[in-house]
Image (spheres, helix red, strand yellow):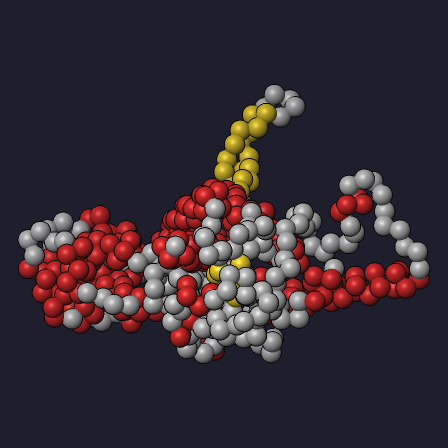
């Protein structure tokens, strides 16, 4: 278990909870399609790798694809030998001692992680930790940061990191095996009597979504593995190492902005890529793009099923106009034929930060108007919004404005699919108590981010290829 023992920087998600983490945003992306990195894995970013790209980078140039690692953790013996019905041969006493020490180390690490899971990240043991759902969600997020955080290029995943990812994810996902729902079925007894008993089946949302996410996970790893032998390579910006000087001056094709200094520069032959390599890149880009859409759809559905925290409803302003501002509110109120696309065109946003800020404001105004539309009822905030909107008069002004805000939010997310989670989505993740939903949400979120980054990395290579061919 060298993989596990060598992962000194890895802690299975037991970082301080979100409320105690500095939320400084290190995002520096301004170009759509470019992968963006930030310093905190707790930003709940929909499409971007949430790891620190500003730390010292490791050299993974020698990474290559290998056989999948064993499913269950801990792993004790070599698969290549056990497949043949053979046991590893121990020739010396030192080998036995090393294996014993390795097993002891793995057991101690497992005990530590199990203890932190039960404590909910509260090492004082006073019971003030976060819920189990949040702990597991953070574990998946941090595992993704550990395995994929240093990956800034399109290449096979390091075998040790691949084994770590599969092994630890199998452990975290094994919780879903015990999340079931009960339904009555008829059972015939030996004496011919028919009785009704309760049978357990996997919970419907886990049964539908978890296998799909595991399939998307496998497909993304396969995409990375397919780039073992390529016609392109990478060089650090400004680096003139031996690996970078293969085409003379690569600086001609690296118009990298200064704020993206940490991104490696893709390089190709002066004649460009071959037709076969170019088609391979385009095919894998299209596949990763479809995976990104699928993961985003699953993530959006899971978030929509989570209850809106009362703390979020309590922070909403008394009027939607206060959220949106006079100009947007005036257009939404006076336009006979409301067009969200036209409104977004008029706003002329220049950055993703502005788009995310607008999404927060629109979402807050939508729930403000929905709450006012149902104000005459005495139910709780979430039940009021969820259950009574169908009974609301469709001609009610608040209902019409809420529907327009919903359409504007949908159009905004379609136009900027790489947006981070909104304030409401983050609040849902923090306050969620459902372990199954926490696993599905975090798993789909990290796969969405990986797929988006793969698309961006491939686009970088294709851009350099087009530049080189245009110069010929």
Quarter of the image where one finds residue 397: bottom left
Q: Is residue 125 visible?
A: yes
User: Where is the N terminus found, in terms of image quarters?
Assistant: bottom right
Q: Residue at x 84, y 64 (%)?
A: 98
Q: Is residue 138 visible?
A: no
Examine the rendered structure and indicate whether residue 317 appears above or below residue 405: below
Examine the rendered structure and indicate whether residue 189 appears above or below residue 338: above
Q: Is residue 115 left or right of residue 392?
A: right
Q: Is residue 327 left or right of residue 432?
A: left
Nearer to us in this view, 292 or 297: 292
Examine the rendered structure and indicate whether residue 123 appears above or below residue 169: below
Place of residue 2 in the rendered image (x, y in percent of width and height, measured from the top left): 73, 62
Nearer to us in this view, 256 or 242: 242
Place of residue 370 in the rendered image (x, y in percent of width and height, measured from the top left): 21, 59
Q: Residue at x 38, y 67 (%)?
A: 255
Nearer to us in this view, 9 or 243: 243
Quarter of the image where one finds residue 120: bottom right
Place of residue 442 in the rendered image (x, y in percent of width and height, measured from the top left): 48, 58
Q: Residue at x 34, y 67 (%)?
A: 30
């Amino acid at each position: 278990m060298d993989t596990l023992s060598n992962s000194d920087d890895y802690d299975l998600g037991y970082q301080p909870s979100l409320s105690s983490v500095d939320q400084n945003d290190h995002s520096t992306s301004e170009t759509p399609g470019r992968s963006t990195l930030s310093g905190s894995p707790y930003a709940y970013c929909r499409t971007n790798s949430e790891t620190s790209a500003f730390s010292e980078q490791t050299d993974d140039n020698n990474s290559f694809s290998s056989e999948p690692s064993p499913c269950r953790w801990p792993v004790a013996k070599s698969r290549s030998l056990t497949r043949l019905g053979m046991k590893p041969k121990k020739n010396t006493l030192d080998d036995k001692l090393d294996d014993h020490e390795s097993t002891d180390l793995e057991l101690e690490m497992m005990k530590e992680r199990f203890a932190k899971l039960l404590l909910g990240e509260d090492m004082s043991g006073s019971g003030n930790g976060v819920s189990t759902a949040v702990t597991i969600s953070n574990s998946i997020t941090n595992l993704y940061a550990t395995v994929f955080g240093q990956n800034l290029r399109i290449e096979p995943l390091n075998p040790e990191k691949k084994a770590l990812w599969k092994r630890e994810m199998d452990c975290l996902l094994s919780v879903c095996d015990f999340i079931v729902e009960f339904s009555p079925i008829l059972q015939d007894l030996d004496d011919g009597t028919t009785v009704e008993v309760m049978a357990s089946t996997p919970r419907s949302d886990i049964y539908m979504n978890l296998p799909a996410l595991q399939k998307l996970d496998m497909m993304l790893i396969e995409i990375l593995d397919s780039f073992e032998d390529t016609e392109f390579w990478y060089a650090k910006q400004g680096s003139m190492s031996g690996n970078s000087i293969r085409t003379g001056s690569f600086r001609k094709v690296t118009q990298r902005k200064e704020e993206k200094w940490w991104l490696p520069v893709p390089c190709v032959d002066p004649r460009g890529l071959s037709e076969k390599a170019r088609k391979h890149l385009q095919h894998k880009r299209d596949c990763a793009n479809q995976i990104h859409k699928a993961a985003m759809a699953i993530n959006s559905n899971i978030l929509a099923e989570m209850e809106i925290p009362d703390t979020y409803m309590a922070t909403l302003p008394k009027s939607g106009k206060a959220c949106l501002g006079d100009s947007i509110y005036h257009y939404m109120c006076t336009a006979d034929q409301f067009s969200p696309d036209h409104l977004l065109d008029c706003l002329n946003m220049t950055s993703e930060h502005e788009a995310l800020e607008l999404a927060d404001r629109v979402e807050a105004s939508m729930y403000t108007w929905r709450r006012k539309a149902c104000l005459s009822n005495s139910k709780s905030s979430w039940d009021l919004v969820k259950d009574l909107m169908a009974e609301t008069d469709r001609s009610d002004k608040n209902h019409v404005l809420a529907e327009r805000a919903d359409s504007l939010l949908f159009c905004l997310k379609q136009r900027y699919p790489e947006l981070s989670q909104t304030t409401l989505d983050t609040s849902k993740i923090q306050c969620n108590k459902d372990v199954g939903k926490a696993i599905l949400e975090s798993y789909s979120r990290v796969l969405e981010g990986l797929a988006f980054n793969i698309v961006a990395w491939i686009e970088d290579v294709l851009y350099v290829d087009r530049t080189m061919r245009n110069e010929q």
